[in-house]
Every structure is written in structure tokens, then in C-alpha cells.
Amino acid sequence: VFINCSLRRFSSEVEKKTQRSFSLMLDKRFYRERKSFLCIDGSKIIPSEQVNDDYCDCEDGSDEPGTSACPRGRFYCTNLGYRPHYIPSSRVNDGICDCCDASDEYNSHAHCPNTCWNLGQRERAYVEGQMRTLDEGLRLKQQLIEEGVLLWREKQAQLGELQQVSEDLQLKLEEHRRKKHEAERLKEQALKALEARDGGEGHFFFNLLYQLKGILNQNIFKIFLKMRALGLLLTLCFGFLSDLQKKLAIDYGANREFLFLNILTPFPPDLFHSKHIFLVWGTWSGTPKNQYGQMVYENGEPCWQGGSRSATVTLTCGTETALRSVKEPSKCQYIMDFQTPVACQPVLKQQGIHSEL
Amino acid sequence: MASITARMTAVLVLWLVACLTGTWAVDRGNFKTCDQSSFCKRQRALKPGESPYRALLETMELTNTRLTLQLINDNNKVRLLLELYRLQGNITRVKINELKPLKPRYEVPDVLVREPPTEPLSLLSQDENGVVLSLGAEAQRVIVSARPFRLDIVEGRDVLMSLNSRGLLAFEHLRMRKDTQTEQDGETEGDPANQAETNKDEDEKEDGMWEETFKSHTDSKPNGPSAISLDFSLPGVEHVYGIPEHADTLRLKTTDNGDPYRLYNLDVFQYELYNPMALYGAVPVMLAHSAQRTTGIFWLNAAETWVDISSNTAGKTVFGKMLDYVQGSSETPQTDVRWISESGIIDVFLMLGPTAKDVFAQYASLTGTQSFPPLTAVGYHQCRWNYNDQEDVKAVDAGFDEHDIPYDFIWLDIEHTDGKRYFTWDPHKFASPKEMLQGIMDKKRKMVAIVDPHIKVDNNYKIHNEIRSRGYYIKNKDGGDYEGWCWPGSAGYPDFTREDMRAWWASMFAYDQYEGTMENLYTWNDMNEPSVFNGPEVTMHKDAMHGAWEHRDLHNIYGFYVQMATAEGLVQRSGGVERPFVLTRAFFAGSQRYGAVWTGDNAAEWDHLKISIPMCLSLGLVGISFCGADVGGFFKSPSAELLVRWYQTGAYQPFFRAHAHLDTPRREPWLFGPENTALIREAVRQRYTLLPYWYQQFYHAHRTGEPIMRPLWVEYPQDPATFALDDEFLIGRDLLVHPVTEEGSRGVTAYLPGKDEVWFDVHTFQKHNGAQNLYIPVTMSSIPVFQRGGSIIPRKLRVRRSSSCMEHDPYTLFVALNPQRTAEGELYEDDGHTFNYEKKEFLHRRLSFVNNALSSVNLAPDATFTTQSWIERIVLLGARKPSRVSMKTADGPENQLEFDYDSSTSVLTLRKPGMNAGADWTVNFE
């Protein structure tokens, strides 16, 4: 009931008879007709002349909504034509223009122009622009989601292929292992035969066996070489596979809309791709409402004099995908602003509409 | 046996400590010990009781204002000239120089504010053993003993101070180098007649008299040995203080078992605590205190100086002292000090008190008082190496508003310049400095940008070209411009000892010279020891030349001159209207006249927080009141708890600035969660409510030279329990602060002095009796602060964005009654930023509560100033409930005042008395 009512023309000995407005107050009749005022926190009753008399009576500051007297007080800027808001009481009559309607500087040397209309204009233009961006962004995002779906399938297919290849390789390897085993068994038998005939029988037979042993050895060696080649291929294949699996395990958003970043632009996790790993993908770190609004990179390249590089990347809605700014507030700790249609969300549109003046 | 064990233990502990702390702390090997500084080693090797000096009484000349007398060294027959002056205000000056030096010896100019006015001396008696002179009207005499030479200053039957009583006066006379040839030439000399002398020279060489090497640096010493030394005995004294800057306790320790305290301005990387090593600044002033008297010694010498302290009671346990007392065998306690300087003359001012405040006045009469800063400089300062660009500055500024934390100054360190070329701006990061400054000005805030005295050697840099073409650089021993390595790489060092150089430097701060500056930009002088990265002990070679003088002669005063010239520049750019604000790291006696000082590159450690108290107290005692330590600690990263505690401590120290190293994570007040933000906000707000009191303290310091942040013993000189306290302090007379400086603290024990005093907790208004150790339980929000009963403190409770925003705000008077139900205080106000207060444009009121009436009377009837501020509230602590309260102004009718009485705390609050702060008025309590 008390919120957003505005009160005008309260005069007191200290104040100029300036029009001021404030809320968090009771209505006009309350002041005019009642002789006393109850602090909003209920802590104290004061005579109504002591409301806005430039002396703080209530702990909660509720008796001085129009002056700077209370340390915990708030002053309401009506800001007609722009957006209303509260400022701390300490900014009333401090010589600095805070409310665009100049209402906070009713008794100071500051000459504050009323800038609400201009601000409102600019704000409206800005919001309009934002809305256009949002529309376009959402359209692009939809495309990207669709592309993402294709990409995802493609990647899944790649994954399948790789898995198939690796299975094939494993099978082949197994087969060769078996062959090698067989060859070795044969060689063993030949050797045993040689040993048994040792010292007697014919020279011819010995020679034959001896040649057989040679052939068998060669065979084993060939199999061994093939196995080595297969092993290498398999290692490579596992490497690709685990890379791909890792990449696919990353949370690319509800509709995998962030997948494209990985492929279309050198962004996560390859944004800082270089010989050294400059930054390593950490995690999404947005608010619960906007989980994908921010991400964190950690454990990057070691920094001179200890620590490792890290970055906090904020994603904002835009029609292009681009890094808008990089800051380094502390050494090797980066703050980045990344614009992309993917960050555009329909919910922003509602907010935008709400903020329209 | 016991003492040997004790020493062994001490050595072991020291070794252990060294091992534990050695991983990151100062590299001690970079800095000389006394043994490595040849003159110190030579002088310290002298044995007491063997003084070769004799006064030649027949040479005595006594005029109305001065006594002169020759001294002779019986070993080498070199004569010295002693001059003795009685100065106004109970000061005796003793100068000793060579009677006929080979060339002039350096006498420190520009430190004394004027030639000190003298008082007549008169001869009381004389015989062949000595002379007795009367020192003016104070019943003081000075006794000059002839053989060996000795000076005693006596008052009544008490010896106040004796000079050369231990016979350690030494004066290395200037001499020709016997062997003038170079070493190669020397080899050709085979004449046995020269053999003895050659040997002697070699001895001298070994002593480092003609050349000295430390690490890879050789000091050429073309003038040979030139050290001076003198000892002082202080009978009855067990406590000596001062001689900053050292990271040590307030009470100076005896130095018998280690190095003397060193005074040599040095840029010490990651300094260690609790030792006598030299730091960034030097004030060669020592105070001696006993329950009976306070005296001071001001050793006016700007060369490298070492101070030895010994005491006949040091090392004695309390039991031992008691035993002495019971047996009646005790000698009087006595402290002996000894000053050793590398060159120059002996020029010493004996400030004879008798009270601490007299000593402050005496020292102020010699070197001046604390400059009166603009009010805004007393607010909170936000600094970091570095705020990266204009956008960063804007964001930090906005952060303070968003979190409703007041601040007055935002600071830019070296990265704001174009390649460390001072007086310039980085063209990309700070492309439109005026726009940035205007943005800050719109919030009624200010900025400080750093200007260091090392100038990049770069032919495309205007400042360098001008200094070079005018010949203003310090020269190396071969006559070329001295070049050292510092932030910009190769750099020259302007010769600030030259008046014409200083005038030129000052002119560089003009708005049309220093482009992009506006009136809300002030200056910070860092690295002015001077710091030379590749020089000996990270400073300048002693054989560098300032005109005819060696750097050796004046090293400690270089930083003083840098700040002097800079402050002058800020005054001049405003046409002499505006007060300057300049922060310096290096300083000397007299630096108080030019601005503020901070304790240099400390660290984010609890011990560094603790040491900030004795370090600033020591500076305050020798005139430099505007002192602070980097809040949060410069190196390393503070925990949230340490940061909060540091804000709480810093809020109650004169210079309140947060600062951080480039390599540390951000630590603006709102980066540690909402709870810590609230704690920091509250600490800063407490500072701002007290700004009227702080400002009044600065005015007082400016007028009297008394320290703002002062040790308890200054106000309670007869209470030995206060003599060594340095974990609590007073601001002015009326506020006692015992900050929480322990990690995880649940309580502190504060000593509340004065057996007839009461103290009021400023937060709870609870009353405590004096002369007790009070245990105060603490939480994270606690800052134990007490207001003395008998005082009145004005505050402004409407804390706003910056001090300027609070200019016209009303006052709340906190009247704390003493047991006699009286109280007294002052209220001072002026425009807050110009020199117009010198033209009597200020208001200064005395507020007093006596006989149940509180009144305001004009302390400066000839001054004029109109204020918009009024009295919005009067809070009486320790009050009784009145039946009626009425107010009477000079020309108004009597008004009845509303009031509110809280019987549980005995606090009486008067609602909105409403009178103008400059008016005469009386409030009666019935």
C-alpha cells in the first residue's frame, strides 16, 4: 500500500518550498490529518511536524524521505519521462545531480538541469535497438541451433566411425596376435623336432628343418611389424576418440547451441589456441537463471611470479559473434565480453518490454 | 653461565627465524651492516674513556649570542672549532667543525625554517679546568670541561645531558692523500724513507678510507675519510624514541649486541620487521623521556648516519632493578647514545623540554610544522599499482557509489605514463585525462598521479632534454650526467639540491606544461631515496656529484628536496591560492612542511599491520604527522579478515590509503563478499564522521608541531605504564584507539590511562575508569575507540560520497563529561582548500561544558569565516537527566530544546538545537 505513492509539497522550516516527491510513505491525508507519525519500523512515534524537518528521528530513516538527515534513508527520484529510482539520502543536496529530474538538489549550489526526457529518449532508442538486435539474434540463434543439430549429428557420426574403426583395428590386432601365436607354436614344434634329431639322422632333414625355422621366424617378424602398425593406428584412433568424446562431453547448452562456437569460430575450448595452452576451459558460471551467461577458464599458462592465467567470459546477445573486450584487472586474470547470437534469449525480450518507458 | 645460555638461545632463535622468514623477505646481503660501512666500523671500534680532545679555554670567545672555543686532538694536533648558541625556547645548539678544513665541509641547508633566534649567554665562572655558562633564565648552566673536553647541561642539581662524556667525539679531518700517485706508479717508489708512509696508506686503504667496495660497487672517496661522531649521556632516562624510519618498536632498543640504528634513505625490497636496518626516510631526531622530563637531540646531518643506544638498565630484569632498589646500590638509570655520520659537520640541537610538548614546539621552531593539508586529503584514498585505463578508473569510481563507500582520491601509479616518462600520459590507456579528471571532479573527488624523480634518458622526451640542456642532472664522478637504472630503464636524476633546478621542476606542474592536468590532480613522489636499481644498496653512488658536493654529503636530504619542489609546483600552478598535497616515500627532518609520508612497500601480513602503529608514532614524534601505511599491505594478498582489520586501523591513522602491488589480485572494498564490504564501509564511514576532528587536529599540528597520532606517554608523561605502549595510540588528546591487529582475535586489552580520567566507548557510550587494563571482547565489526571524559568532539554524521560533499553539513557534538562534570573541545572550520586561513579566514570556537552549561565562544575574534553548517545534535555522555534544557544565542531569544535521555547509558541527546556553527551560544541544563 505504501509503495509508489508520491507525495508533494512538504514544507518545513529548513526546506525550500520545492516540489519533491518520495515514496515509501503514507498517503497525503495521513500527513495532513494525523498529528503523529509512526516510524515505518514501528520503533517510534513522532509529531508529524518532525517529518522531513531535516533531523533524523527514526532508526530506519523513514521520517526523512526528502532530506539527507538519516544515515539509512532513501530518497525517491520520480524522474518523470525516465525511470524512477531510489538514491541514498546522503546524495540529497550534496551538490551532485543524481536524479535526472533534479529533485535531489533542491537546496544546493548545483544547477541541475532536468535531463529525464533526453535520457528517456536515449533509453527508448537504445531499447528499440536492443529489441531489433534481439530479434535478429534469436533468428540467427535458431539457425545456429539447427546447424548445431547437424553438427552434432556429424560429430556423432564421426564418433561412430571412429569407434567402428577402432573396433576393426582391435579385431585385426587380435587376429594378428592369434596368427603370431600360431606361428610361434609352429616354430616351437620345429625347434623341438630339431632338438630330438640332434646328433644323428640325415643331413638333409636337418637342413630342411633349419630352413623352416628361418621361414617361421620371418613370418613372426612380419606379423610383429603389422601388429606394431596396427597398434600405432589404434593409439591414434583412441586419441581422436577421446578428444572427440571430451569435446562432446562439454555442456553446449540446452539445445547444443554453443556447439557451433567450437567449430565455426575458434572459441571454446580453442579460443586461445597456441603452442602453449593459454587458457583451459573450466565451467559455465552464470547465474541460476542464466546458466550460460558466463564461463570461466582456469589453470591456463603459468604467470610470471606464480599463479596461472584465468578468464571470466561474459556472453551477451548480439548479431555477430565476436570478442568485444578483454580486460586484465589483476595480472593474468582476464575479464572478457563475448557477443554472440547464441546468448540471445526470448526472456530478454520480456525484460526489454518491461523496461520500456 | 646463565647469560651465555641465554645468548645461545637468542642466537638459535634468531637463526631459526632467519631460516623461516628467509624465503621471501629482504635480501639483507644487499644492504650494509655497520661492519661493511667502513666509517661506521672505524668509529665503532673507538673505545670509550680515551678522548683525545681537549678544550683550549684560552681561545674562548663569548659574544652576546655565541660562544666559540677551539678543541684540539692531542694525538694529531688537529684543531676543531666549537660554537655554542643558546636558542630561544630552551634549545642549545652545538656546532663543531674543523678550525681550518682543507676544503669546506657540508652544512645542511634548507632544513631550518630560519636562522634560529638566539638568547644571551653569560659567563658564570671560569678556571683552568673549565667554564660555566648560564643558559638564559631557566636556571640552566652549561659546564665546559677542558681535559678531556666535555659538555654538561645542568638544571639545578640535575644533569640533563652530557656531551662527549664517554669520550667518543671523533672528527676525521680532511687530509691530502699521502700517496697521490696511482697504484702502478707507486710500485716504482723504492725510497725507504717513504716506506713507513706507504705502509700507513695501505692501512688506510684497508680501512676503506680512500676507497671502499661493497658487492660489485666501488666508492672512490676522493676526499678520504671525513666521519664525525659524538656521544650523549642522558641521566635518568630509560626510554628513547624517534630516529625514524625503522620497522621497529616505538621504544628504541639498545644496540650493544647488534648493529646501530641506521639512517640512510634506501629502497628496501620487502623489508623485514623489528630490526635497525635503514628504510626509505631519515629524521635524525631522538626524544628521551622519563617521568620527570622529556628532551630531544636533533643531529642535523644528511650523510649516512648510525645511532648506537646503550643503557645501564638494559638487560636488567624487573627483579634485578628491584634488588638494586632494595639494596640502595642502584646507579641512576642512564641511556647513552652515540651518533656517527660519514661526512659533514657536527651540528646538534639539544631540545631541553622540559615536557614533550615543549620539545615538539622546540623542534617545530627549528624545522617547521606539518603542512596543513586540504581537507579532502584527510579522507580515504584508493590506490593500486595500477588502475589500467580510464575505463578502469571510471568503473572503480562507480563501484564506490554502487557500494555506498565514500572516498576522496583515486590514485594512478607508474603505468599511467607514456613509458614511465613522468608528466605524460599513456596515449592509449589514458588518452583523454582531462575528461577522466572532469568525471572525477563531477563527483567532487580528486586524483593523484605519480611523478618520480628518475627521468628516462630519451632524446624525444621534453623533460629529459630540458634537464640535460640546462645541466640540471646530478653528475657522476667523472663529470658526465649520472645515469642509473630505474623503471624507465636508463634514467638521469635531476639535482634537486639546486634551487634553480627546483624552480624549474615546480614550473613543470603548470597546467600548460603538464598537459592533461586539472586542479583536482595532485602528486605522489616515489623512489626518491633515490632508488637506483643498479646502484650500491639500490641507491646512488656516493661519489656522484651535486655541484661541489658529493652525494655522500647530502644523500638523506634528496627526497626532501623532491617533495619540496613538487609541493611548490602545486602551489604555483594555482597562483599561490591552493594548498598542495604531495605524498613522499623518502623524507628528512623538515619534510613535514611539504605533505604526507607513507611507510613504503609493506606486506599483507598481520605483523605489518601491527608495525604500522609504532612506525607512524615514531614519525609523529619527530614532526611528521601525516603518516600512514598501505592499507591491506603492498606485497602479497591479504585475507579478507586482514584487509578488514587493516581498514579499521587505517581509518584511525592520519593518512588513510589502500594500495596493492601489480601482481596481486584486485582488492577493492566490495570484492570480499557483502559482509566484508559492509565492515569496510563502516570503517571508512567512521573516518568520515570524524573528519571535523581530524581536520582540527591537522590545524593544531600545523600550528604547534604536536603529533596528531601520538603515543600515550605524551599525554600521560608520568605514567610509566604508557612508556612502551605501541599497540594503541591517541588521536590528539581525546581519542584513544586500540585497533585489533591479531588474526582471529576475540578480545583486546587496552590500557586506559589517567587515574582521574574516565573513557567512553564511542560505539556503546559505556564509561570506563582510567588507569586500568580493560579487556574488550571483539567481533569482526569492533574497532575499540574511546573518547576521553572531559572532551568535546564534533562530528558530521551525514556521511556522503566524499569529504567535499559534506562541506556544508551540520555537526553533532559529542560531549563526554569527566568526573568533575566538565568538558572542553574545539571546532575549527575554513574553506578546506586554500591558504586563506593564513589571512584569518576561518572560524575557531572553544566549546566548553562547565556548571551545567555548554557554550561556544570565539577563539579567534579577529578571524572571519561564514559557515552554512549548523549544530544538529548534541550528545552528552555521562550525563544526568535534566528537567529542562534551554538555549540562548547572542541575539536571539531563549529557546527550549527537546531532548531524549537514555538512563541505561546516561546519554542525553539534544534534538536539533539548530544554531549556526560560527555563532556564540549557551545551552543551559537545569
Image (cartoon, rainbow, N blue to C red):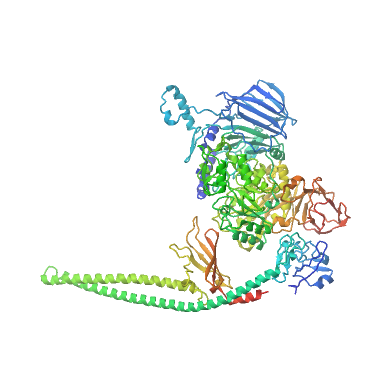
**Residue B436, percent across and down?**
63, 58
Position above or below: B463 against A191? above
Quadrant in the picture for residue A23: bottom right
**Residue B388, percent across and down?**
57, 58
**Residue A185, percent across and down?**
23, 73
Position above or below: A288 against B873? below
Nearest the eye: A119 or B759: A119
> How many numbered marks does the figure carry?
0
Quadrant assignment for the N terminus of chain A: bottom right
Q: Is residue B106 left or right of residue B139?
A: left
Position above or below: A78 against B521? below
Q: Is residue B280 left or right of residue A168?
A: right
> Can residue B222 be seen in the rendering of this structure?
yes
**Residue A283, percent across and down?**
51, 68
Quadrant assignment for the C terminus of chain A: bottom right
> Can residue A60 be seen in the rendering of this structure?
no
